[in-house]
Image: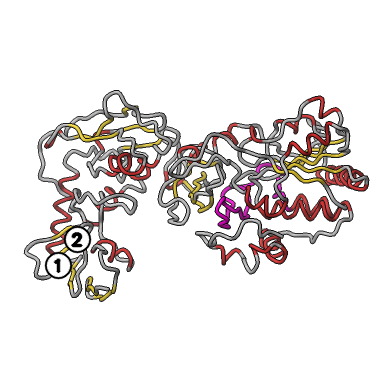
Amino acid sequence: MPKVVIDGKEIEVAAGTTILQAALSEGSEIPHYCWHEGLSVAGNCRMCLVEVEKAPKLVIGCYTPVADGMVVHTQSEKVKQARAAMMEFFLINHPLDCPICDQAGECKLQDYAVEHGTGVSRYTEPKLALNKAVDIGRHVMLDQERCIQCSRCIRFCDEITKTGELAFFQRGERSQIGIVPGRRLDNAYSGNVVDLCPVGALTLKEFRFQTRVWYLKNTPTVCAGCSRGCNVVVGVGQQQTLMTTRGQMDDRVKRIVARSNEAVNGPWICDEGRLSYQPGAAAKRLDAAESPAGTACDWDAAIEKAAGLLKAAAAKGALAIVASPRLTTEDLFAWRKLAQGLGGATFAVRRLVRGEDDRLLLRADKGANATGAEWLLGDTAESAVLDKAARGEVQALLVLGDNLDPADTLALDPGVRARIGAIVFAGAFVSGTAESATVLLPTTAWAEEDGTIVNFEGRIQRVRRARTPWGESRPGWKVAAELAQAAGAAILPWTRFEQVLDALAAEVAPYAGLDADAIGLLGTAPASAGAGA
């Protein structure tokens, strides 16, 4: 493998590695706009110019492969002058509207202007006035005057989605990026062009003007939209010392962006996952224990009542449980332990299958933890439990509601409901079965608890708490443990998710030897499906 010296430090890299990649691999920053890890090399922004000894002129780091013995300088006076000149060029027509631009705070033009610019422009002519706030798609707006023509968005549509909605139009100083006539940027991954845009020319309608990015608390976690389990970063509002509006401190999910994981989703996510927080945000939450629905109840009294109902039904072999495939594995493990402690129950897991798999990321199976549920509970569909209930063989039904989308919670047919003695609903949203439940226990929604889920390939990944739990809601594993204690079933009184994970790792084969640190930010190598408890 070739050895290259970058700024006096010798490193060894794989053949074909470019100077920019070699520098980044060692933690050295070379400024760049057009280069992106997931796209082809365009080499048109010229911000990554570096000096190579014996070369007649500066070269672009993103395109130039290293050669054995190459000596590179990224901080020489020639390089600094070139970067300053490029920054002056980029800012000729850019409106410098940082006070109103959504990219402010994470804009590469801002960052590089401070780090590499001179703060002086020799350009005295009026700036070009290009189109402002152009609606180019279901989710994306274009502010043409901010664009520096790095072409990342064009290459994404040409190379990744292969839909080709964006292109360059006109030439020279009149050159601009726009939508192809008669087209709209409505492919299933359109939001990625917003993540790709380094300067705020492309913004997401759903996030535009919602808050400033420095008011966000960002948490790395995993999308619950489908069984792919894409890695994402969830941004929620957080209280700051200097606030301008209450809307910026409401602790709600403000946006979801992609987090790169080459083993799962690369640097991309689909629009469906990016906006998966919206149904839950618009739905009515179950914020306190109720018995029956609509009647407020002390939490301990609700636990006592629910535990009595479940225990009595289990003693007669007439307890059934329907679980969401989006619950964390820790939740499912705790509910299984509760059922075992009560003497057994008929378990079923909902099927959430819509649409088809596509060639990129989207999966028809919307059960983010369907694999984990199968490992712990088997593959019995909810229809088996409903058929049993229709025959009058279910005295108590425990429904574990969905933690992402209220529309994906079980809704019972009135005729079936009439033949079930009692329903205990443990979920986040008021919907479906919750409205006819005997006891309702609020549990946390997605982004409100720590845990693990298993994607369709058997990869175990961590979901992390990004926001404060709603009302009295508690993690499902904790509610299960409280019910077990009240019913006299043997479950340890867990108080932290790590304790549940330890117990899970001791009993379920694919989790053997795992803890939160071992799973880390990128998850584990896929474990064998069917190798469950």
The span picked out in magenta is 448-477
Q: Is residue 339 magenta?
A: no
In the rendered image, which residue does mark 2 sit on? 64
Dominant secondary structure, magenta:
loop
Give the mark nearer the N terminus: 1 vs 2.
1
- Whether residue 331 sits left or right of residue 98 in the image: it is right
Number of residue marks: 2
- Check the image and report above or below for 516 versus 356: below
Cβ atoms at labels 1 and 2 below 8 Å apart: yes
Q: In the rendered view of the protein, which quadrant contains the C terminus?
A: bottom right
Q: Is 395 or 96 nearer to us in this picture?
A: 395
How far across and down, in percent of the image, does residue 501 sit?
Answer: 67, 61
Tag in front: 1 or 2 = 2
- Relative height, residue 171 to residue 339 (above, below): above
For numbered disc 2, what is the local secondary structure?
A: loop
- Tell me residue 174's x, y (percent): 14, 33
The residue that appears at 75% across and 41% down in the rendered structure is 322
